[in-house]
Amino acid sequence: MFYMAEAVLLTKKLSFSKHAGVISGFNQHFIKTGVFDYKYYEMLRYAFEQRNIGDYIFQTQISKETAQKVIN
């Protein structure tokens, strides 16, 4: 999902150095303008939040159901 967001931003010659910038830019240029449905922004943001939990909050485990939701 992240690389998809980066790719569509590149169609407007936009590039961001941080994940949060890509997500924000995707929202600003493609969701708020109606190019993509808001649900895709929600899915991207949710997947990013789960990735951060998995990568940085070592005491927390992501459930199989949550992982499957992100994959789907």
Image (cartoon, grey):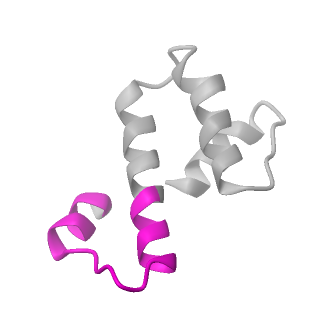
Front in this rendered view, residue 41 or 9? 41
* Residue at 35% over, 85% down: 59
Q: In which quarter of the image is residue 63?
A: bottom left
> Is residue 14 left or right of 61 when viewed as pictured?
right
Q: Quadrant of residue 68?
A: bottom left
Front in this rendered view, residue 32 or 53? 53
Q: Residue furthest front?
A: 59
| Residue 34 vertical position relative to residue 19 in the rendered view, above or below | above
> Is residue 56 left or right of 17 when viewed as pictured?
left
> Is residue 53 left or right of 67 when viewed as pictured?
right
* Magenta span includes 40: no
Q: In which quarter of the image is the C terminus?
A: bottom left
Q: Residue furthest top?
A: 33
* Residue at 81% over, 45% down: 15
| Residue 39 vertical position relative to residue 35 in the rendered view, above or below | below
> Is residue 7 left or right of 62 when viewed as pictured?
right
| Residue 21 vertical position relative to residue 36 in the rendered view, above or below | below
* Residue at 40% over, 24% down: 37
Front in this rendered view, residue 15 or 55? 55
Q: Position of residue 24 (x, y in %)?
A: 63, 37
Q: Position of residue 46 (x, y in %)?
A: 38, 51
Q: Position of residue 27 (x, y in %)?
A: 57, 30
| Residue 18 vertical position relative to residue 60 in the rendered view, above or below | above
> What span is colored magenta in the figure?
49-70
Q: Main secondary structure of the magenta part?
A: helix
* Magenta span includes 57: yes
Q: In which quarter of the image is residue 32?
A: top right
* Residue at 84% over, 36% down: 13
Q: Which residue lies furthest to the bottom in this view?
A: 58
Please give the count of numbered marks on the rendered protein. Answer: 0
